[in-house]
Image (tube, grey):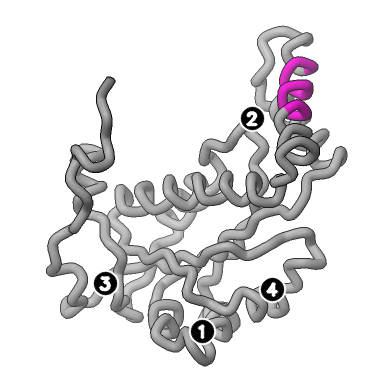
Amino acid sequence: MSITDIAMKRYSTKSFDPAKKISPEILEKLKMLLRYSPSSVNIQPWNFIIAESEEAKARIAKSTQGDYHFNTSKITDASHVVVFCAKTHVNEQYLSEVLQQEDTDGRFALPEHKEMMAGARDYFINIHKDNLQDLPQWLEKQVFLNLGSFLLGSAALGLDSVPMEGLDFDILDNEFNLSEQGLKPIAVVSLGYRTEDDFNAQLTKSRLAEDKIITLV
């Protein structure tokens, strides 16, 4: 199946079969998708909570209390649930850790390339911190890049999924002490296998016409 076929097939699952579970082998591939997503200057400003036990999913489902009850079963019936978190800041220790990992992984053909990468990363961070003053928002954008890649990748693995922002993020924050870790929850993705009667699986996709959103010049 081509990547465009997968994009056309993927949809937001509304009903998961709680009896069908993701295998350990597929879970490892999902972790790889999370790790190897692109990000600006490879800054990787993210952290992920993966819930697979019923207890863990129930903790996440607390965030659907009140106005978001329509999302509860999408969490509790799913095989696994991922909380996507963005770092609220990046300090020198973290940047040094990223740089050292790149060095360990053989990213630098020449010794001076390591210094060049550090300088480029600092340059863009300082632009967003000092000039544009939107560093937290910029870091969140990188996590949404990851989320988009993750949705397409999980579909390629034969999984059904649904991304959700209809949650009380303050509850998630308190439940997992995220602020204390310098993290902010920004989205949740439930994964598993749909039920046979999931109405959304039978509906056609609807997108704006090509000439409305694409300009060839």
* Label 1 crowd bin: few (<14), some (14–19), many (20+), radius 10 Å: many
Marks 1 and 3 sit apart, C-alpha to C-alpha, by 20 Å
Marks 2 and 4 sit apart, C-alpha to C-alpha, by 27 Å
Marks 1 and 2 sit apart, C-alpha to C-alpha, by 35 Å
> In this picture, is 1 found above or below 48?
above
Residue beneath disc 2: 41
Residue beneath disc 1: 64
Quarter location, residue 169: bottom right
* Label 4 crowd bin: few (<14), some (14–19), many (20+), radius 10 Å: some
User: Which stretch did the figure color magenta?
Assistant: 115-123
Q: Is residue 195 left or right of residue 100?
A: left
Say if residue 59 shows up in the picture.
Answer: yes
Horizontal and vertical percent position of residue 26 = 40, 55
Of badges 3 and 2, the one in the foreground is 2
Instruction: Look at label 3 and name its amino acid.
Output: Arg
Observer-nearest of 187 and 152: 187
Image quadrant occupied by the C terminus? top left
Residue beneath disc 4: 173
Secondary element at tag 2: helix
* Label 2 crowd bin: few (<14), some (14–19), many (20+), radius 10 Å: some
Residue sitting at 77 percent across and 10 percent down? Answer: 111
Do the residues bearing badges 1 and 3 touch, measured as CB atoms within 8 Å?
A: no
Say if residue 55 shows up in the picture.
Answer: no
Horizontal and vertical percent position of residue 74 = 39, 78
